[in-house]
Amino acid sequence: MVAIFGVVGASSADTGSSKLVAEVAEQYWQIVLREPTVRLDQGMPVSYLPDVTYQHTAAQAQEARKILERLRAVNPQQITHDESITVDALRWELNRLIEDEKYFWLKSTQVVTPYRSAIPGANRILTSWKFKSANDVDGYLSMLAKYPAFVQSMREILGGQVARGIVLPKAEIAQVDGFLAGYLKPAEKSVFFVSKERLAGLSPAVAERFQASVARMIGEQVNPALAGLLEFVRGDYSAKAPEAVGESQYPGGKEYYRYLVRDYTTMDVTPEEVHQAGLDEVARINARMAEARKAIGFAGTKAEFHEALKKDPRYFEKTPEDVERRLMAFVRLMEPKIDAYFRVKPKAPYGVKRLEPALEASQTFGHYERPSANDPKGYYYFNGSDLAHRSWANSEMLMYHELIPGHHFQLSLMQENEQLPKFRRNAFYGANAEGWGEYAAMLAEEMGLYQDPYNRYGRYASEMFLASRLVVDTGMNYFGWSRERATAYMRDNILESDEQIATETLRYSTDMPGQALGYKMGALKIRALREKARAALGDRFDIRDFHDWFLMPGSMPMTVLEKHVDYEVKRVSAARN
């Protein structure tokens, strides 16, 4: 395997600066471990719910400033190359905590939106609670008793935002309403109720008393808290909701969005540059799609072809089990080709599963979840609802992006690399991770996949979807586009249905502004770095080396990745002489 832990200007990694880097990395990891959902994923005990308050954010920012000051004492000439990656990644993370305080009231607009709210994470703590003894029963009741205060903190944030002229758009209110109302159910149907199956390890008498206590707390404490939050959203908050979408309408919103562009791309780029990159990519991909339609033999317009694809029975499945079989068939096509492009493969197994049905209404597609202490297998969770209207035209590309050699390779190898500091083994940078997923889907074409011309068109359509996001995300959040303009632009260029476009435009403009930029911008950067390395190394370039350089050090900001690839190219070049 290509070495990635070379020493820069030091004869030994056992220096004072090396020791300081290790200490600070562990100090930061302890901050990360305070987040209850992180503790849950690490298999650690959890005794509190997420803290979404300004006070918590401000305290973290102050701590981050102190840790950054410690890093100033690191001598870059006395640390290894890998330690320099750790230092750069730490600086990025610590500055992000500081920016969280600066932009708290704008960022917390998403406190009740389906994609970004802390509510699903808090609920997951409770729904995954294990019951082995009476102590576990007491612990669950204690956690459930904390839930009303957790909900109240969200109500206070929304009130603080109203006072600052920051209110979610009217179009998002219906999504928030459905999201919150979905948790307001009678006690025994509530997500917080504990079934007999989960209590199988307890005596029937203890289980029965516990269920009665849980039902009482849901009815008397949890549901009233949720109902109060929902009532506020439906009332005074909703009355002040603007018609417009996007960050630029809020006080300081344009500056905040410029920060979001840097944060999500982890590159020094501007909204203007991203917007232009999107326009360029849309034009390039449209040309490829036209060539593909011609090769297929379709004589009509692009719109006519897309309408035909939306109804083509080859892209529809009758049951979730059929979807699972379809997706795994493409994984099996990829598996024999992996060794020619990758030296190292993760140990963790992988597969696909259906999303929880309760989550499907708020998620257009699905998502990958890496192996955790609770489940050692990595899964792509697909949306199995409304299958009669859900096309799987992009299903081949999807598996290369989500499983192999995409997210599963990157995130599992990162977790399995015990040489990395713990915070790096668990890091997630959207442009790096989602950029890698899109790069993996692109790589599959180079590997000779997408043999079916319709699947190849599905790949181009998916690429077009990601490229269009660069245009409409910046358009709505920075250039003042209406949601209607963004919807029309996407409808003209992408394959997705009107219903999916409606969900996605809300996601970009209100749920997760800037987040969608990382996919395409990250992939473009990875490919540019690969071709830069190829040009510099000539016949010494090996694509397996490049993939090692990317995967083995784990996820990192793209600015750090560029420095890392430059280092590796210089190292290989020097070894030639």
Image (cartoon, rainbow, N blue to C red):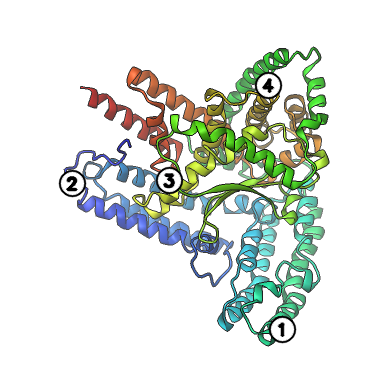
Whether residue 79 sits left or right of residue 306 in the image: it is left
Going from the N terminus, do you reach mark 4 or mark 2 first?
Answer: 2
Q: CA distance from mark 3 to mark 2?
A: 26 Å
> In the drawing, what numbered circle is on residue 208?
1
Identify the residue at image location x=39%, y=21%.
Answer: 534
Residue 542 visible in the displayed image: yes
Mark 3 — residue? 92
Q: CA distance from mark 3 to mark 4?
A: 43 Å
Image marks 3 and 1: residues in contact by CB distance under 8 Å: no
Identify which residue, 204 or 540, lies in the foreground: 204
Q: Amino acid at mark 4?
A: Pro
Q: Decide: few, some or many residues near mark 2? Use Cα within 10 Å; few <14, some 14-19, many ≥20.
A: few
Disc sitting over residue 266 in the figure: none
- Residue 332 lies in quadrant: top right
Give the residue displayed 82% in from the left and 20% down from the top: 304
In the rendered image, residue 50, in percent from the top left (x then y), is placed at: 58, 64
Is 420 in front, or is 394? Answer: 394
The local secondary structure at tag 1 comes to helix
Q: Are marks 2 and 1 in contact (CB under 8 Å)?
A: no
Q: Earlier in the sequence, mark 3 or mark 1?
A: 3
Between the C-alphas of marks 4 and 1, the distance is 59 Å
- Residue occupied by mark 4: 453
Mark 3: secondary structure: helix
Mark 4 or 1, closer to the camera: 4
Q: Quadrant of the C terminus?
A: top left
Residue 310 located left or right of residue 454 = right
Going by the numbered disc 3, the residue's amino acid type is: Trp
| Mark 2 secondary-structure assignment | loop
Q: Quadrant of residue 36?
A: bottom right
User: Which residue does the numbered mark 2 point to in the structure image?
Assistant: 12
In the image, is 142 to the left or to the right of 547?
right
Instruction: Give the number of callouts.
Output: 4
